[in-house]
Image: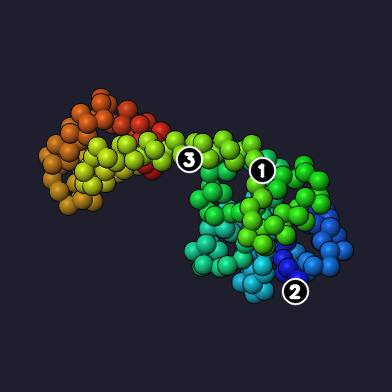
C-alpha cells in the first residue's frame, strides 16, 4: 500500500520541486500540495495522510502552529519538518511536539524521500548535531527543574511561576485567593530556600531551570 502524503511549503517553486521529487516514487502518493499552514491543516483533516511534509517557516500559521493544532486534535498523521536551519530552541519545540522527522533544505533531495519512508515506518529521522545540543539542554533543564521543585511546596511552586510571569503580589494574592501578607511570607521562604535576593533573580533562576 502506498504511503499517502501531504506537502506544505509557501514557496511555489520549492513546492513544485517537492511534488516532482515524489511523483516517480511508486510507493508514495501525494494527496495535496499546500502553500499555507491553514491549507495544510485542511488537507490533513480532509485526507488523513500517513505523513505531512511541512515547512517550519510560513507566513500566518507556521509549521509549529500547524503541529500544535494537530496535536490538540490527536491527528495520527506523522510529520517530517523542512527547514533551512534548526536553532536550538526550535529543536526543543520539535521534541515537545513529538516530531519524528526533520530534514534540512540543504540536504540532498533523495534524503527527504528516505526520511518520509523512515518516519512512516515509525523510525526517527533527525538532524543530529542540532538535536544533540537540544537534547542535552532539555535534560539539563529537566534536572534543574526537579531540583528546584524538590525544595518547594506545591503552593510555593505555583507562586514562583506567577512571579516569573510578571504578576505582582496583589495579583498573585487574588489569583491564589490568599492575602498579600501570605504572598510575602511565601516569597520570603522561597528566597531563602533558593538563595536568591529578589524577584528578578528568582525569575532568572526559574527560566534557567526550565520551570516555565
Going by the image, does 197 lie left or right of 20? left
- Compared with 57, 20 (above or below) is below
Q: Residue at the spot x=41%, y=33% of the render?
A: 208
Q: Which residue is mark 1?
A: 127
Colour style of the rendered protein structure: rainbow
Q: Which residue is mark 3?
A: 138
Mark 1 and mark 3 lie on one chain; the one further toward the N terminus is: 1
How many C-alpha atoms fall within 10 Å of the one at disc 1: few (<14), some, or many (≥20)? some
Which of the two residues, 86 or 166, is positioned nearer the viewer here? 86
How many C-alpha atoms fall within 10 Å of the one at disc 2: few (<14), some, or many (≥20)? few
Mark 2 and mark 3 lie on one chain; the one further toward the N terminus is: 2
The answer to whether residue 58 is visible is no
Label at residue 7: none
Q: Residue at the spot x=62%, y=38% of the render?
A: 130
Q: Residue at the spot x=72%, y=60% of the render?
A: 117
Which of the two residues, 121 or 203, is positioned nearer the viewer here? 121
Q: Residue at the spot x=32%, y=36% of the render?
A: 147
Amino acid at each position: 500500500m502506498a504511503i499517502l502524503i501531504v506537502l506544505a511549503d509557501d514557496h511555489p517553486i520549492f513546492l513544485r520541486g517537492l511534488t516532482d521529487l515524489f511523483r516517480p516514487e511508486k510507493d508514495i502518493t501525494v494527496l495535496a500540495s499546500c502553500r499555507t499552514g491553514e491549507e495544510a491543516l485542511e488537507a490533513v483533516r480532509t485526507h488523513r495522510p500517513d505523513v505531512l511534509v511541512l515547512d517550519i517557516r510560513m507566513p500566518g500559521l507556521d509549521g509549529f502552529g500547524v503541529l500544535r493544532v494537530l496535536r490538540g486534535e490527536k491527528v495520527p498523521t506523522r510529520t517530517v519538518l523542512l527547514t533551512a536551519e534548526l536553532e536550538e530552541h526550535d529543536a526543543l519545540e520539535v521534541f515537545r511536539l513529538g516530531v519524528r522527522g526533520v530534514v534540512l533544505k540543504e540536504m540532498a533531495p533523495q534524503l527527504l524521500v528516505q526520511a518520509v519512508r523512515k518516519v512512516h515506518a515509525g523510525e526517527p529521522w533527525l538532524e543530529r548535531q542540532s538535536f544533540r545540543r537540544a537534547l542535552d539542554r532539555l535534560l539539563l533543564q529537566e534536572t534543574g527543574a526537579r531540583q528546584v521543585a524538590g525544595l518547594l511546596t506545591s503552593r510555593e511552586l505555583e507562586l514562583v511561576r506567577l512571579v516569573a510571569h510578571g504578576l505582582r503580589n496583589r495579583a498573585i494574592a487574588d489569583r491564589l485567593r490568599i492575602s498579600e501578607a501570605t504572598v510575602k511570607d511565601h516569597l520570603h521562604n522561597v528566597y531563602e530556600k533558593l538563595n536568591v535576593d529578589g524577584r528578578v533573580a528568582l525569575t532568572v533562576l526559574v527560566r534557567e531551570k526550565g520551570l516555565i
